[in-house]
Image (cartoon, rainbow, N blue to C red):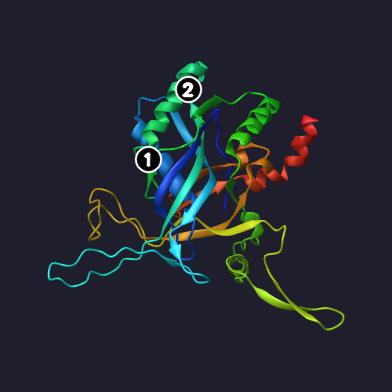
Amino acid sequence: MTPHRLPDINALLHIPHLRIQNANAISGPHSWGHPGPTAFTGLMTALRRKLGPELDLDMVGVGIINHHYQAQTNGDYVQRFNLSRNPLNKDGSTAAIVEEGHIHLELSLVFGLALGNTLSGASQAELDQLATRIQQTLHTLRVAGGSILPGRSRLQPRLKHLPESTEEQQGQFRQLRRWLMPGYALLARDDLLPAPAQPGEAADGSRLDAWLDQCRLNHYPVADEQGQVSWQHSRQQGQGWIVPLPVGYGALTPLYPPGSVAHCRDETTPVRFVESLYSLGEWLSPHRLTDYRQLLWYPSHDASSGVYRCHNDYHLTRAAEPAILGELA
């Protein structure tokens, strides 16, 4: 697949401490928990449309920082979702239970913006008014299907131009990191999976095996020199908080004309069936990040292959950190 990099942005918008009730906790058929990045790139698209075409900006990427979560489950070792009983049917019989997973969240979002010529020269007071307007518009939307509740944070939304020099950008991001803590940022860790098979090579399933190993705890016995056996697990201390992560959708069928597929909610939009695309992610404290590009998720779409995928440049920019730090020194 062609490598992607974050498109050019010239401003960062920080929306602090959103309280979200009953967000969707089932973001794919093989994982549950925190909503995946597609929920937030979709939120970014919906927010931009809600703001209207007259606003001279484009939303390019979104950073996800979690401060608190509460999964709506019960149980000790095996967790079960808290399900609601639907009203009785017309004949008095019991309605079927539709399994829905919910989670309460407290999030901060960081949007990467590409401001047009009008807003590029705006004063800080004008940018503050725009940030407040965007936050108020965001409160009218749903985040991963969840409702936004009134916040309790003393922090105000902040919209800042990106400085031109790398050193000033680093200083601005260090200040942003303080506002994002305590919390954990969701980052991509595609680098933990083996390289995909090249064209003409047979796929050996190693990528799937590596992904499955990160989705579970593997316990195995280890014997010492005296023959004493102790049990260890695959998640050793210091390896990070690695999670399976749905990052997009891949097409299973061609694009069908509008109205040709029965029971669709929209009869004016082309339709196709898709499946989830999975990778690995990591929850990392913002103080360990050195660049805003490590924080932002951005979408890409390949019409020829029917792939919609979210990308994050954490592992790409982390590999270049020694060179960047050498330049700053």
Q: Earlier in the sequence, mark 1 or mark 2?
A: 1
326 left or right of 264 in image: right
The answer to whether mark 1 and mark 2 are in CB contact below 8 A is no
Q: Does residue 122 appear in the picture of this structure?
A: no
Q: Does residue 23 appear in the picture of this structure?
A: yes
**Extreme residue toward the left, this view:** 91
Q: CA distance from mark 1 to mark 2?
A: 21 Å
Q: Is residue 180 above or below residue 163?
A: below
* Numbered circle sitting on residue 317: none
Q: Where does residue 286 sit, x and y in percent of width and height?
A: 63, 42
16 left or right of 168 in image: left
Q: Is residue 12 above or below residue 99?
A: above
Q: Quadrant of the C terminus?
A: top right
Q: Where does residue 142 sit, x and y in percent of width and height?
A: 37, 44
What residue is rendered at 43% in x and 22% in y?
A: 129
**Extreme residue toward the bottom, this view:** 227
Amino acid identity at mark 2: Asp
Amino acid identity at mark 1: Ala
Q: Where does residue 57 sit, x and y in percent of width and height?
A: 44, 28
Q: Nearer the viewer, residue 251 or 96?
A: 96
Q: Where does residue 194 sit, x and y in percent of width and height?
A: 65, 62
The residue at which mark 1 appears reads as 46
The residue at which mark 2 appears reads as 128
273 left or right of 276 in image: left
What residue is rendered at 35% in x and 25% in y?
A: 54
140 left or right of 284 in image: left
Q: Residues within 10 Å of mark 1 (few under 14, many from 20)?
A: some
Q: Residues within 10 Å of mark 2 (few under 14, many from 20)?
A: some
